[in-house]
Amino acid sequence: MGKGRVEAFSDGVFAIIITIMVLELKKPDGSGVHDLLALWPVFLSYVLSFIYVGIYWNNHHHMFQAVKSVTGGTLWANLHLLFWLSLMPFATAWMAEDHFQPLPVALYGLVLALCGGAYTILMRVLLRHHAKDSTLARAAAGDHRDWMSVVAYAIGIALAFVLPYVSLDIYALVALVWLIPSRRFEHILRAEGA
């Protein structure tokens, strides 16, 4: 099967997720600077989640640039990823509105971990479908950020119950690690004219 519909549908879902998150940004109750500053948890949560959704969109784009075709399994693995990503607005809003209380911060980390696991599953499904020397296989080789992220999320989730702000720092550090797409992907895609 061609990959075009998967990419188009996924792009639409990413756009809807960001739209839902931005709609959670409400105007301050008053007109003073202190009223605006009272919204810092909402804005910080939005920025972190926007960055995460952007990272997934960017990496999803790079992944599918290296893909030649998809299978039914790919469609389900992609939907699995989009399902967990679709929970980002809920987790973001709860964490923000409850001012980074332990349970919402832990749930946010769990959603991040499940998104990361779903992305890894999608990559594995695509790798099984493509040859060992395919563009995708060569571009994905040696990238161990996914396992590092799982460990970091687990630590962040556990710490959320005692040190929620440290958990947020961990989530932000994982985002920094993923912020720049794999140079290997860009190099191989450029070399092959993809």
Image (cartoon, rainbow, N blue to C red):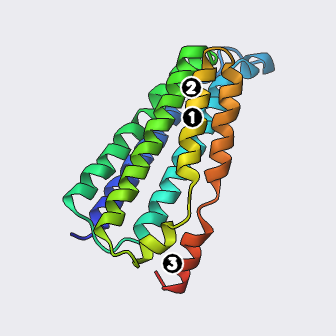
Q: What residue do we see at 41% from left, 79% from top?
A: 133
**Mark with earlier residue (2, 3):** 2
**Mark with earlier residue (1, 3):** 1
What's the distance in space between the residues labelled 2 and 3, CA to CA?
Answer: 36 Å
Is the C-beta separation of discs 1 and 2 under 8 Å?
Answer: yes
Q: Residues within 10 Å of mark 3 (few under 14, many from 20)?
A: some
The residue carrying mark 2 is 157
Q: Residues within 10 Å of mark 1 (few under 14, many from 20)?
A: many
In the shown orientation, is residue 99 left or right of residue 81? right
Depth order, front residue of 150/177: 150
The residue carrying mark 1 is 153
Q: Amino acid at mark 3?
A: Leu
SS label for mark 2:
helix
Is the C-beta separation of discs 2 and 3 under 8 Å?
Answer: no
The residue carrying mark 3 is 189
Q: Position of residue 146 (x, y in %)?
A: 53, 50
Q: Position of residue 74 (x, y in %)?
A: 27, 57
Q: Amino acid at mark 2?
A: Ile
Q: What residue do we see at 27% from left, 62% from top?
A: 5
Q: Position of residue 66 (x, y in %)?
A: 42, 72
SS label for mark 3:
helix
SS label for mark 1:
helix
Task: Determine whether 50 is above or below 131 in the image.
Answer: above
Q: Amino acid at mark 1?
A: Tyr
